Image (cartoon, rainbow, N blue to C red):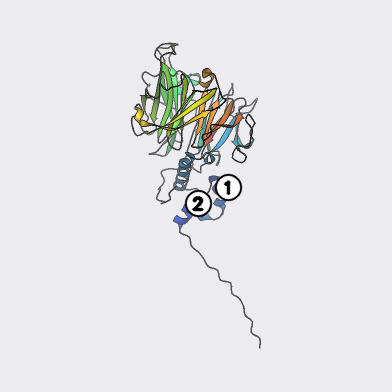
Amino acid sequence: MQVSNTTKKQHVNISIPKEVVVEILQRVPCKDLFETLKKVCMQWCSIIYSGSFAYSHVECRILKSSSSFSQLEAVVIVSINGTRSVTVSALEWHSSFPNYPPDDIWETKYMYTLDDVLEFPPQVITVNSVNGFVCFWSCNARLHVCNPLTDEYFTTPPYTYENRFVPLCLAAVGFGFCQLSYEYKVVVLHEDGEGFESVEIKPLVFTVGTDRSWRSLKAIPDTKFYTRHEKGVHVKGVLYWYMESCTLPRCRSKIIKSLICFDVSKEEVVTTMVPAELDSLEGGRYVSRIAEKGRNLCLVNISYGPICSLLIKVYIADTSTDLSSFNSWKNEFNVTVPNMAYNISIMNSWFVSIVTDDMLVIQIMSESEIFIDVATGMLLSARILYGSASFIPYVPSLVSLFHRPPLLNSSFTC
């Protein structure tokens, strides 16, 4: 008699608590979540597409972007010749950076095309990014908001003031987030009036997904921008613009430097002076710009350094205190960039795109982006921008414009 041994396969069902799954997924890059892991099972898909997960995930990445350039991605928006369309492409810098030599043209990966968003002349201006959304302005007085990862896209109607079309009077523009209602708002500051004495700055606001037309707010008193098309910086529910104005027409010897602060929730504007100590630094003439560094407001001063070099000083603001006080600003770090002398008048058209602990990225005259290593001050690389191309850095996100207040009850810690 033969006895046959049969092996029975036993299936063990392991149930992982949802809280643990959330903790694990929080540590996965956003692109992998969106392209791959959402297909694993219904539970994972439900978690990844939930507002609570999306907001906590992007918040963690934004905080990490303060110290690491690797957390940031960028898109390049380029108008298509002879059409009213623009292409949105990913700038592929992390795969080979910094192996490219300076002045090389970096590769981009086509993402999608936005049709019929421009009018003649086909001009595109970078605004800023918030929670993974990038915002840009087009010459037909519209603002465009899109999530480069999910392809979600929204265009505002043309902005007007008192039923008048005012595309050529753009003084400043910004894209902000209301932390109370979880709504996104675009804000335009435009000049109204003729002549130096009669010009006023008047805000216009549009709430994405709620408003059907632009809402006008009361004029900002005693405010005159020295330059136009200033880009906003969004930090903790407040939009900031750096403003240089003068007390007399064409008088550049008495330039007043201040910050315009727009509370996105209250829709109120406050103007505060830049501390005198920051306005009288050693080294002669300089230019100042503001930027975001991981949910912090930065003031970046760029001036001449020794022997044909640039001296860059970065200050971090404590936005919970009086920004007109020097004690509210901390000198985060200084960088000396050798062999990089520029005329100060050219530097007035520079914009600081990225500030992290390891990298500074500066846009020069809307023509190129230079990448500076913070530790050594060396110029690592540069990317040439052609035509009306716009470069917008952002932190990848799964957030939707229509996600509403999440229940952030996860114990996850970045």
- Is residue 271 visible in the rendered image? The answer is yes
Determine the secondary structure under disc 2.
helix
Instruction: Report the number of discs.
Output: 2
Q: Is residue 78 above or below residue 9?
A: above
- In the image, taking residue 195 as reference, residue 338 lies left or right, namely right
Q: Is residue 211 left or right of residue 113?
A: left
Give the image location of residue 261, x and y in percent: 39, 28
Q: Residue at x 51, y 53 (%)?
A: 44
Is 319 situated left or right of 144 in this image? left
Q: In the image, residue 248 lies at what x, y percent?
A: 40, 11
Label 1 sits on what residue type? Glu
Query: Callout 1: 10 Å neighbours few (<14), some, many (20+)?
Result: few
User: Measured from the top left, where is residue 38 in percent x and y?
Assistant: 54, 51
C-alpha separation, residue under disc 2 versus residue under disc 1: 13 Å
Q: Tell me if I can see residue 85 in this picture.
A: no
Query: Could you say which disc has been placed on residue 351 in the image?
Result: none
Camera-nearest residue between 362 and 151: 362
The first of marks 2 and 1 along the sequence is 2
Q: Which mark is residue 35?
A: 1
Task: List the single residue furthest toward the bottom.
Answer: 1
Quarter of the rendering containing residue 111:
top right
Q: Secondary structure at mark 1?
A: helix
Q: Nearer the viewer, residue 402 or 103?
A: 103
**Which is nearer the eye, 157 or 49?**
49
Q: Which residue is mark 2?
A: 25
| Above or below: residue 133 compared with residue 384 | below
Q: In the rendered view, would you say 74 is above or below 49?
A: above
User: Which residue shows up at 43% across the image and 25% down it?
Assistant: 242
Residue 276, quarter of the rendered image: top left
Q: Looking at the picture, tell me which residue is in the foreground, 65 or 278.
A: 278
Mark closer to the observer (2, 1): 2
Quarter of the N terminus within the rendering: bottom right
